[in-house]
Image: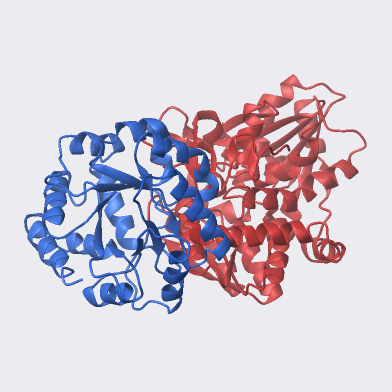
Amino acid sequence: MNKNPLLIPYITAGFPAKKLFLPILKTLSENSADFIEVGMPHSDPLADGHVIQHSSKVALENGVTLKWIIDTSRDLHLREIKPLILFSYLNPVLQYGFEKLLKDLPKPLFYGLIIPDLPLEEAEKYLPLFKKHKLHLIPLVAPTTNKEKIKKIVRAYCNISLSDGFIYLVSAIGVTGARQYFSKDLKNKIKEIKSYTTKPVVVGFGISNLKQAKEVISYGADGIVIGSALIKILMETKNNKAILKLKKFIRSFKNK
Amino acid sequence: MKTRQKGYFGKYGGQFVPETIMPALEELEITFNKYKNDKSFKAELDLLLKTYVGRPTPLYFAKRLTEHYRKAKIFLKREDLCHTGAHKINNCIGQALLAKKLGKKRIIAETGAGQHGLATATVCALFGLECEIYMGAVDIKRQELNVFKMQLLGAQVIPVKSGSRTLKDATSEAIRDWITNIKTTHYIIGSTVGPHPYPAIVSYFQSVIGDELKKQLKKDPDYIVACVGGGSNSMGIFYPYLNFENTRLIGVEAGGVSLKNGHHAATLTLGKPGVLHGSYSYLLQDKNGIIKEAHSISAGLDYPGVGPQHAYLKDKNIVQYKNISDKEALQAFNFLSKMEGIIPALESSHAVAYLKYLMPKTKKNEVVVVNLSGRGDKDINTVKSSGLNSNS
């Protein structure tokens, strides 16, 4: 069992308000986050459940764009902010310009990207660009991904990527959002991936409390992503209290 | 159509979906390729198309319409006479047979006008499959009759209240359901959209329309006109004619209220390439890649995307894409009803409406075929409330 698992909170950029983006990043960075996933809101977030659909809608209404995310994070420094991972659906990336985005993202503040609708089959042609611009494309492995495909994914992404990086394992079949329990297959899947790579395996989708986080870590995961549960905290809290609530919530995972 | 890379038509198409459903797409592709040329599969499909759907659908010579324009002869391919009232069932029967081969007992589908939902609910009743239909809350209201029919057939109609509450959001929600229930469920996409292999599968099952047309006409038509939303009825009738230089193919998109104010669904005319619902094609979107809301009086054309084959055919200039406004479609709805005693679907009315632009350019010895993709019973309330029903 990993004694020092990675804690990766997900936020939708500009939710609940643009002015809270930097305070949220700072709060998470100061309170045990190891990376922060920054979600670019999209009109059609196919992999997301109701909570992140809602935060995306609000953030879009707030006028969040990739350009805004880049401009706002340009002056941040890794001294105060943990490394960021941009989570975006493909279309905003394509319209911004794939390579232009990789070029424009401030580095080393930005560590990599997660593009949930870009499976390996479609990602291959972009992989050299990631190497060129010193960014990771974090691969997603799903519960439905078979051995052969896992091998292919590990091979393709490890070849291009820098010395570190990690594999993002989707905890269960379905979209993002809280789940009651995890299937036993999760343990086997983690084991399976680890038999092909030494890279950390981070588990996301559906982890909403410390108990679940501990469960997933006990299965052999090297880290967890907390998304919808965190967004829900922000949804249910008035803006002026959001930071305080968030701090309390993320700290509850400190005993990870 | 030439495909250089798997699942691509030129640079359009692909499989832009979460990894969770990639294995199901592969399984579907393998199953489709295995059975599309399988004798007993084809025999089962053909028998159902004949005895259950009512194929072949007639090719009707529209005499009064022809006399009205005094130009080329006008024929209507009567897909409106299919069981359930539109071409949608051609694809549903085929995909339900594939679902059986896949061992999937639960079917989901998205619907706009309700015609695809109705056809899906129908084949699910036919094969004893569990059926859930995602439909935008706006469309549920404007297509009330089809909602009732789907429920009558044993399907559950799930209202989608996100986004524009129309076909785009119904499709997104159906994809989310599929991601969640991937092991038990087959998703019957109703148009030539979505990730590979869907555009290829839907085109294949719909190409029965064009194949029949080839047998029904002694000479190849000079023009074929069909409406384009996602693009299934048009792909179906165009498919066998794509390499025919003498047959001009015209796809008619929904021009909505106006092309200028953004209230339209003229994706190929005004859209830009991007990714929506799993494939790369033309889309209505802003400069940041956020999908815009489409608008059309016809729920079946009210979609900000279009199938990847159409994107390719547009770029290659193989099909000409035009558009017709809501108002013109309503006028055509009335016109065809009074001229021929055929009430067309508002979707198909767009194709009929284009005749007023096309016919003056045609010659007397030429032949024009309009794909009458569906009947208009479902649209009576929309037409009634539009206030345009008395003029023709």
Q: Which chain is red?
A: B
One can see residue B89 in this view: no
Residue A120 lies, in percent from the top left, at 51, 50
In the image, is residue A63 above or below residue A57? above
Residue at left offset 16%, top offset 72%: A255
Return the residue nearer the eye: B273 or B390.
B273
Question: How many numbered tags mark residues here?
Answer: 0
Q: Is residue B20 left or right of residue A207?
A: right
In the image, is residue A212 above or below residue A27? below
Q: Which chain is blue?
A: A
Residue B259 lies, in percent from the top left, at 47, 29
Residue B39 lies, in percent from the top left, at 87, 62
Residue B202 lies, in percent from the top left, at 68, 52
Single out the residue that lies furthest toward the right. Answer: B218
Q: Quadrant of residue A225?
A: bottom left
Query: Which quadrant does the N terminus of chain B fall into?
Result: top right
Return the residue nearer the eye: A210 or B149.
A210
Residue at left offset 73%, top offset 25%: B359
Q: Quadrant of residue A100?
A: top left
Query: Which quadrant does the C terminus of chain B fall into?
Result: top right
Return the residue nearer the eye: A220 or A141.
A220
In the image, is residue B219 above or below residue B185? above
